[in-house]
Image (spheres, rainbow, N blue to C red):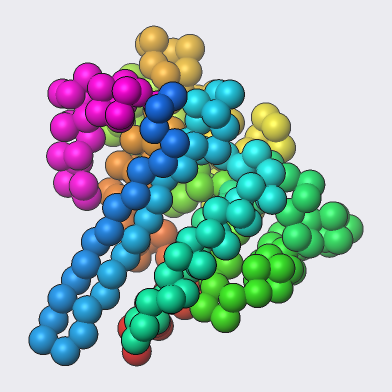
Amino acid sequence: MMSGTFQRFIAQSGTNQQFLYYGPKRTPSISAEIRFDSDKVYDTYRFSLLMTSRKKNAYGGMISYSQAKGDLTKWMKEVYQEKNVEHYFTTMFDFYALPNDFPGFCDTKNISDAYSKVNKIEESLAADIGWKNFIPYIQLHEFEALLFCDIGKLEKQYPRCKKDIQGLNDVLQSYNGNPEMINSGVDTAPSKRIISAIEGKRFYRYNKPSSGANVTAEIGIDNLKSKCRHFKMWLEKLEGLKD
């Protein structure tokens, strides 16, 4: 999957309409498991892709917190009965467009510092879930902020938009070079800025799922961590689980 062969397989199969069971309308979820074995221990990573809006046939975005919590608690109950296995759960929710019913969201509206705000929301989320092995994470301000760690990698995906994409560096500098501070306005969230730089020019359309994955993979995890401190803290928590 990391090499892009999974994407090519789906494309050759006729996109998600053919790959999914009778198309997205009949495929409410996709689950997978990756297992790494050694002589002494093994690690297993499980993930599920859920339809978040059946009306829109959408697999991304959060319609409501109650729905997300329902999914999390369901998975936790599924693994609770497994013996001699330590399970951890985490999230990656965008701060941009969090629903109003999200824990701590309304309580932090008067907090101006983005890091203090998101830390408080994560604390509230952990308290509401109430699972000792749950590691909450809210992405400042949106996943696409990570692409601002190296805009040059985005240019490779859309070479005919080079001039407009380079203008995104000016946006980054206006936030002192910190991608996590690019705000969450309706027109100024990271993804909105990227779309504005790409769409309508040379007949391009920004492909959020594939471009996001490809660009961040090229940027590399070390560069992402060096420029996004909240993202780094989250990953280091996950990396510390193996010790």
Magenta stretch encompasses residue 164? no
- Residue drawn where x is 64% and y is 47% of the image: 67
Identify the image quadrant of residue 203: top left
View extreme (front): residue: 81
Residue 94, given in percent of the width and then of the height, sits at 59, 49
Q: What stretch is highlighted in magenta?
A: 1-24
Q: In which quarter of the image is the C terminus?
A: bottom left
Total label count?
Answer: 0
Residue 68, given in percent of the width and then of the height, sits at 60, 51
- Residue drawn where x is 21% and y is 67% of the image: 35
Magenta stretch encompasses residue 10? yes
Q: Can residue 208 be seen in this view?
A: yes
- Residue drawn where x is 16% and y is 89% of the image: 40
| 216, above or below 230, in the image | above
Please name whichever residue, 82 or 8, is drawn nearer the observer in this view of the structure.
82
Task: Give left or right: position of 62 versus 222.
Answer: right
View extreme (right): residue: 110
Q: Can residue 152 be seen in this view?
A: no
